[in-house]
Amino acid sequence: KGALGSGGSVRAFYSAKGGSGKTLIAAMVAQSLQLQFEKRVILIDFNAQFGGIEVILGLELGRAYLDLQPVLQELSFNHIQNVAVEEKTTGIHVLLSPVNPELAEQITDELVTRVIRTCKAHFDEVILDVPSTLNTVSYTALAESQHIYYVITPDSMSIRGLKYAVDLFRRYQIGNRGNLHLIMNRKNKKSELSEKDLTHLVDVPLIGTVRA
């Protein structure tokens, strides 16, 4: 089954600029979908070198999706359950990145694809926290996603990163199904850019704003 096949929804949160708050927003969306909409949710931290989901959710570091590599060819829901951590407060399941950032080089596009598709077949919502660097992991995760949310902060450096990312997305046909959307984070009265400014600068729809 491909990214657009039957099963749950895959939603990726991405930003080319570090420190945008995408990890926190991804975690909050996952919790909200589980609690308010009674969805069965799994959150996957693909930030193999600079992850932080476990800190935000107060989880103990343990097994990671990289541990699924030996069983990749017969990957099943049981394997996912054995590695995933359940966040007790909300009940969401979480697949953590490797504890050792040096292991990031061992993560293959096949691992990313099979993990996402297996989760998609057994969960209502699959939430991906995608690394800012556009590499094999991030490209594969974005390509497997039905919805891509680019998290931007209201400043000129963030706009620069967005324009660069959108050019790359178009080159590699990411988000070309009308499934790329913007979320403005940390908006306040003193922000360098407004929502109106953003709509004039890029042709990607803004679907939400998070106030600082």
Image (spheres, rainbow, N blue to C red):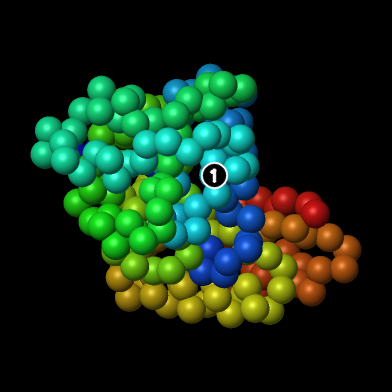
Asked if residue 14 is positioned above or below residue 146 in the image, the reply reads: below
Asked if residue 154 is positioned above or below residue 186 in the image, the reply reads: below
Residue 56 in sight in this render = yes
Estimate how packed mark 1 is, as few (under 14), some (14 to 19) or many (20 or more) residues with alpha carbons within 10 Å.
many
Secondary element type, mark 1:
helix
Q: Nearer the viewer, residue 52 or 20?
A: 52
Q: Nearer the viewer, residue 127 or 112?
A: 112
Q: Nearer the viewer, residue 163 or 90?
A: 90
| Quadrant hosting residue 136 | bottom left
Residue 2 in sight in this render = no
Q: What residue is drawn where x is 54% and y is 41%?
A: 54
Image side of residue 187 versus residue 77, left or right: right
> Which residue lies most toward the right here?
189
Report the number of discs: 1
Image side of residue 189 versus residue 195, left or right: right
**Which residue position is annotated with label 1?**
53
